[in-house]
Image (cartoon, grey):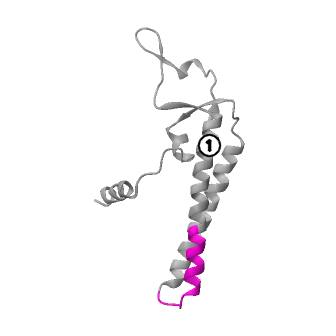
Amino acid sequence: MMVPNAAGPAGDRCADRSGRDVVDGLRLTITGGELRRLLDDRIAEHERSAAYWKRELVRAAGEQADEGAGQNEETFANEAVRHEWRIDVLAFIRDHVEPLHTYCIDRSDLIFAELLPMKPWFVEKEAEDRAEQ
């Protein structure tokens, strides 16, 4: 969960041998302004993807009905809706981020808010191939 950086319960911190604080796990600090920019970038990607799937849906509906065409149309419509939902989710988060605060985010935040750069298609394909084996 993304929350402004604040002192947490005493059990939240570790210390190394010299007594300095050590972060337990992957936690990044990011300014609200930068977080909003990253969310805007991801929203724009979803807007492009939603528009693409809507165009594909119109194109498929205009083609002569052939076997499996209805299935393609359903897939195209579902993909457009999925991207529109992600736009809504990310816009909601962005609209509630305070630009002047610093946020401490963890791995689950990075994944949920899609803050990491997109994987190249071949990296995604490699992961799928390994999962199938």
Instruction: Assess whether residue 64 is covered by the magenta stretch.
Output: yes
Image position, residue 71 (x, y; %):
51, 80
The residue drawn where x is 32% and y is 56% is: 126
| Front residue (pair 48, 22) | 48
| Front residue (pair 47, 96) | 47
How packed mark 1 is, by other alpha carbons closer than 10 Å (few <14, some 14-19, many 20 or more), is some
The residue labelled by disc 1 is: 37
Q: Is residue 53 above or below residue 62?
A: above
Q: Is residue 27 above or below residue 61?
A: above
Query: Would you identify the image quadrant in which residue 87 lies?
Result: bottom right
Instruction: Tell me which secondary structure the magenta stretch mostly adopts.
Output: helix
Amino acid at dot 1: Arg
Residue 80 seen anywhere in this rendered image of the structure: yes
Q: Point out the image quarter for the N terminus.
A: top right
Q: Point out the image quarter for the C terminus.
A: bottom left
The residue drawn where x is 42% and y is 8% is: 18
The residue drawn where x is 46% and y is 9% is: 19
| Front residue (pair 126, 52) | 52
The residue drawn where x is 47% and y is 12% is: 20
Q: Is residue 117 above or below residue 101?
A: below
Q: For the residue labelled by badge 1, is the local secondary structure a helix, a strand or a loop? A: helix
Q: Which residues are magenta?
A: 52-67
Image position, residue 5 (x, y; %):
62, 26
- Residue found at the far top of this picture: 18
